[in-house]
Amino acid sequence: MTEAGGPAGWAARLSGGPPILVTGAAGFIGFHVATRLLDNGVPVVGLDDLNDYYDPALKRARLDRLDRHEAFRFVEAGLEDERTVRRLFAETRPETVCHLAAQAGVRHSIENPGAYARSNLTGFLNVLEGCRAVGAKHLAFASSSSVYGGNTRLPFSVANGADHPVSLYAATKKANEAMAHSYAHLYGLPTTGLRFFTVYGPWGRPDMAYFIFADAIRAGRPIRLFNNGEMERDFTYIDDIVEGVVRILARPARPDPGFDSASPDPARSWAPWRLYNIGNRRSERLTDFVDILEREIGRKAIREFAPMQPGDVAATCADIRELEAEVGFRPDTRLEDGLARFVRWHRDWTANRANLGAP
């Protein structure tokens, strides 16, 4: 669906001011968002700590592509480094901040909870403080479909409750939404939370199931399907995610004049604060997902079935009517098409890594 005023009307609204600060710029979504901004003439300052949660060579390869743009500047630092984050905000004085950095991974949060407190809580507080200090006009930040946790009412709607997270990762994302609201209320900082649903595509994260499956299928190793394969996900192609993000960046959150504090809408506020889902609007069976991967790779998977993992949920599906009403966003990438593009990229990336002698 095309935005009123042209497909890149958002770029005109984001141009002409200071560079946009994109945290997590060497990460999967951050890299694609920064690329889209730069390709449309919007300068970007990128922040990332290039940690080794997954292969840093992939992060550096993404960064190499961003460095080809003259309007891109990179700062290597962790969000928990308060002094560096404060100095970066003071030097660049961004009016728009796209906060996509975080310690990711549901299962990893069970094994290493401290990393999530440092990056997702302390780090997010440092971003909020930076925005407050420079009077930023909009902070858009990554939340997650994981916040819905024990809520099994599909499709997930931002108007419904999300108060029962089942992993620490989800809890930190829910906390981010609450922290952002407090800054919107106290300081008038426009903040928008974006609940992403299972993002996939080229340059993706090696810790995600689709990447793990592709690696294993190519190598003839077994893949594990949890909950005995009875899993459904709202798989959302990266280009659709990026389209939603850049349009939201150009639409700072506004107070809802009709907000009813006696019957509050969980996604709106009297303060300039909003929440949106970004998803593909449909659940896909994990076994069907694997079928497509097999066809694209040209090799059958060795399937092993396992019980549900702690912190996981059986199904997700996004209700995106709020987002569509706000910015005219509707995903249009079929799973078959998106996975075909990912598999082509994965083949090339695997070959390049092998040529470099990487494991």
Image (cartoon, helix red, strand yellow):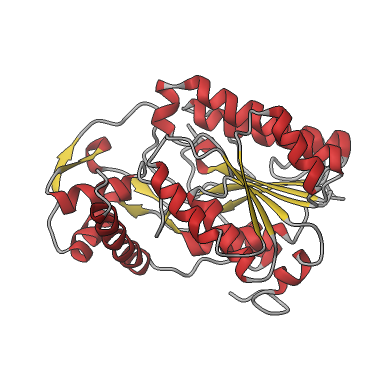
Residue 180: tell me if it is visible. Answer: no
**Looking at the picture, how far across and down is residue 36, in whole percent?**
59, 65
Q: Image quadrant of residue 304?
A: top left
In the rendered image, the vertical position of residue 345 relative to residue 218, given as above or below = below
In the rendered image, the vertical position of residue 125 relative to residue 94, given as above or below = above
Position of residue 340 in the picture relative to residue 294 (left or right): right
Residue furthest out toward the front: 356
In the depicted view, which residue is nearer to us: 136 or 169?
A: 136
Q: Which quadrant of the figure contains the N terminus?
A: bottom right
**Looking at the picture, how far across and down is residue 53, in whole percent?**
42, 34
The residue lying at 15 percent from left, 64 percent from top is 298
Position of residue 160 in the picture relative to residue 357 (left or right): right
Q: Image quadrant of residue 264?
A: top right
**Looking at the picture, how far across and down is residue 65, in whole percent?**
50, 61
Residue 62: tell me if it is visible. Answer: yes
In the rendered image, the vertical position of residue 268 relative to residue 62, given as above or below = above
Q: Which quadrant of the figure contains the C terminus?
A: top left
Position of residue 109 in the picture relative to residue 210 (left or right): right
**Looking at the picture, how far across and down is residue 5, in whole percent?**
73, 79
